[in-house]
Image (cartoon, rainbow, N blue to C red):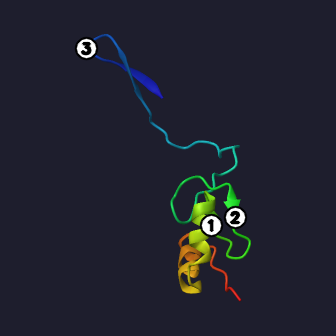
């Protein structure tokens, strides 16, 4: 990274390299239905959800839909 002078005598940052070390923070988990942060996982379907209302919605989903949601995040599991 280096700074270039601009006409207003302000410095504009220019990033030459986008490589960086891996993050030390844990990856965030997102709700499979809404996309919000998901602190919960349904033990029956393994879908992540953000609130109790979403859990009610998940419980009424057919198995095919559950499999599609799981496949979107590469977590497809055959449910019994």
- Across and down, in percent, residue 16 comes to 45, 36
Q: Quadrant of residue 55?
A: bottom right
Q: Quadrant location of residue 6?
A: top left
Give the Cα separation between the discs numbered 2 and 1.
9 Å
Residue 31 - label: none
Sequence-first disc among 3 and 1: 3
Residue at the (48%, 29%) spot, across then down? 1
Q: Which residue is mark 3?
A: 7
Taking 8 as reference, is 42 left or right?
Answer: right
> Is residue 24 shown above or below 14?
below
Q: Which residue is mark 2?
A: 41
Please, what secondary structure does the residue beneath circle 2 have?
strand
Residue contact at pointers 3 and 1, CB within 8 angstroms: no
Circle 1: element type: helix
- State left or right for residue 6 relative to residue 77: left
Reading the chain from its start, which is encountered first: label 2 or label 1? 2
Residue that mark 1 sits on: 55
């Amino acid at each position: 990274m280096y700074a270039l002078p601009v006409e207003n005598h302000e410095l504009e940052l220019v990033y030459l390299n986008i490589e960086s070390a891996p993050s030390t923070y844990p990856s965030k988990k997102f709700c499979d239905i809404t996309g919000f942060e998901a602190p919960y996982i349904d033990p029956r379907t393994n879908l992540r959800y953000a609130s109790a209302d979403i859990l009610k919605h998940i419980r009424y989903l057919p198995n095919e839909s559950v499999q599609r949601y799981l496949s979107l995040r590469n977590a497809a599991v055959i449910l019994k």
